Amino acid sequence: MVLKDTGFPKDFLWGGATAANQCEGGYKEAGRGLANVDVVPIGKDRLPIIAGLKKSLNFDEEHFYPAKEAIDMYHRYKDDIALFAEMGFKTYRLSIAWSRIFPNGDEKVPNEAGLKFYEEMFKECRKYGIEPLVTITHFDCPMHLITEYGSWRNRKLVEFYENLCQVIFNRYKGLVRYWLTFNEINMILHAPFMGAGLVFEADENQEQVKYQAAHHELVASAIATKIAHEVDPENKVGCMLAAGNYYPYTCKPEDVWKGMQEDRENYFFVDIQSRGEYPAYARKELERKGIEIKMEEGDLTLLKNNTVDFISFSYYSSRVASTDSKHNETEGNIFASTKNPYLEASEWGWQIDPLGLRITMNAMYDRYQKPLFIVENGLGAVDEPDENGYVKDDYRIDYLREHIKAMKEAIVEDGVELLGYTTWGCIDLVSAGTGEMKKRYGFIYVDRDNEGNGTLKRTKKKSFDWYKKVIATNGENLD
């Protein structure tokens, strides 16, 4: 079949995305160690734990921990990847659970069973011609590194992460070519326990700890990029940001300035990973806050010489900045912002803005002049299966259709270079933000509820066949 020119490159990487901690389960299988994400429960304590304000370092009888079993992809990945292949995936974004490879995180010798598991998973992707896109750390830190070292506030974690990278880049050479160093690296500022395993003490300067930990992650990311290129010059390494531009609520200069400041807080990370240096505005802001980042000799050179090959990001919604505290707030991927009166919202309050994706793409491409990769986008919704277990999720199709149109406009009309698109939660999984199963993103329904009940049976939704058609026509047929 000859594909028409649809505006998307002929080698465009259509696919879907998951994260180990939200889908694998098997939390103690084959020597895997405990990780931060395992002990984040569903319920009222989830957000303070995610924020590092409430300590949760092991399981208790009071809470339900959805990541322990999740959707059991650990035992079902072959069937799941076969379904992805049936949809026509060109790529599948997944992550490595650090504690499967190094159960404590600080060992010298890796866990062979963990290495073998991912090797088989990547080979299964390759069997179907699916390109693995692998996140090295997706909200995942071995618990031992938290309890014994204080997690990423400790410089030692750079060394442990480097060891992980040496092992996986060499082991999976030829199987994996696309790598992401840290998922949504800016989440360290908003969800520090989930993002970086940080638990704050009562007398700590939280901002100081977060930015020091961020520096360690940025150095680790640069080292990973260096190793990846040394091990295999064909490797492509990207950073990953929780994105979504801020609109000023009004044209009042103070609102415009606040929006610019909010955007800069996010771009800070990519500015360093893509441009290779701390931007002037960030140096001044850290100085104003009294934050002094401890650096080792050679850090700045490492950052400068090992910038990423492409910029990847998640996009769910745009945000609004206002200096007026009276305005209503809305949620959006942990971020709270002023509610936009011109936009509709999902059941969880995430405002739906396809044009905002085009705006974000242009802002990032103008700023960095590097290829972009949208690695998360989708609609979390409550799905209601009919008597046969079938879900008619036209609302999900509508959301994705409009965002794909916006992507195409950015490519064709604006000249943005886009490598690929992986929808978030291509199979229903545990929500990172809420821990819920009922907040579903997938093309594949998983019989599992918030309390862990269900058969885990997989059933194709209406959107499954729709996305299959989108991929087969390289984005031409969106009906």
Image (cartoon, rainbow, N blue to C red):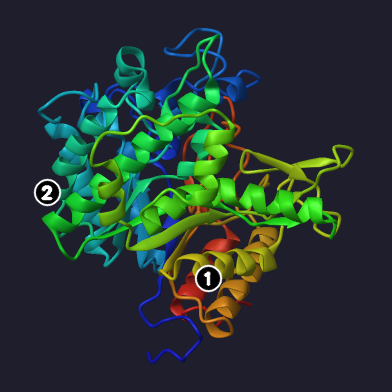
Q: Position of residue 233 (x, y in %)?
A: 16, 64
Q: Is residue 417 above or below residue 421?
A: below
Residue drawn at 56 percent across, 25 percent down? 51
Residue drawn at 50 percent across, 29 percent down? 291
Q: As rendered, which of 134 and 219 lies closer to the eye?
A: 219
Q: Where is residue 222 in the image (x, y as percent from the top left)?
A: 28, 48
Hey, what amino acid is under mark 2? Asn
Q: Position of residue 128 (x, y in %)?
A: 27, 65
Q: In this view, does 251 lie above or below 471?
A: above
Q: Where is residue 127 in the image (x, y as percent from the top left)?
A: 22, 62
Q: As rendered, which of 344 and 469 lies closer to the eye?
A: 344
Using the rendered view, name the quadrant where residue 438 is placed: top right
Label number found at residue 271: none
Q: As rendered, which of 86 and 165 lies closer to the eye?
A: 165
The local crowd at label 2, few if under 14, some if 14 to 19, many if 20 or more residues have their Cα within 10 Å, is few
Q: As rendered, which of 226 and 478 lies closer to the eye?
A: 226
Using the rendered view, name the quadrant where residue 143 is placed: top left
Residue drawn at 57 percent across, 40 percent down? 285
Using the rendered view, name the quadrant where residue 304 is placed: bottom left
Hey, what amino acid is under mark 1? Asp
Viewed as shown, does residue 254 lie left or right of 161? right
- Closer to the N terminus: mark 1 or mark 2? 2
Give the position of the N terminus as an image quadrant. bottom left
Q: Name the residue under label 2.
A: 170
Q: Mark 1 points at which residue?
A: 366
Q: In this view, does 385 lie above or below 398?
A: above
Task: Quote the CA–CA distance across marks 1 and 2.
Answer: 34 Å
The answer to whether any part of residue 157 appears in the image is yes
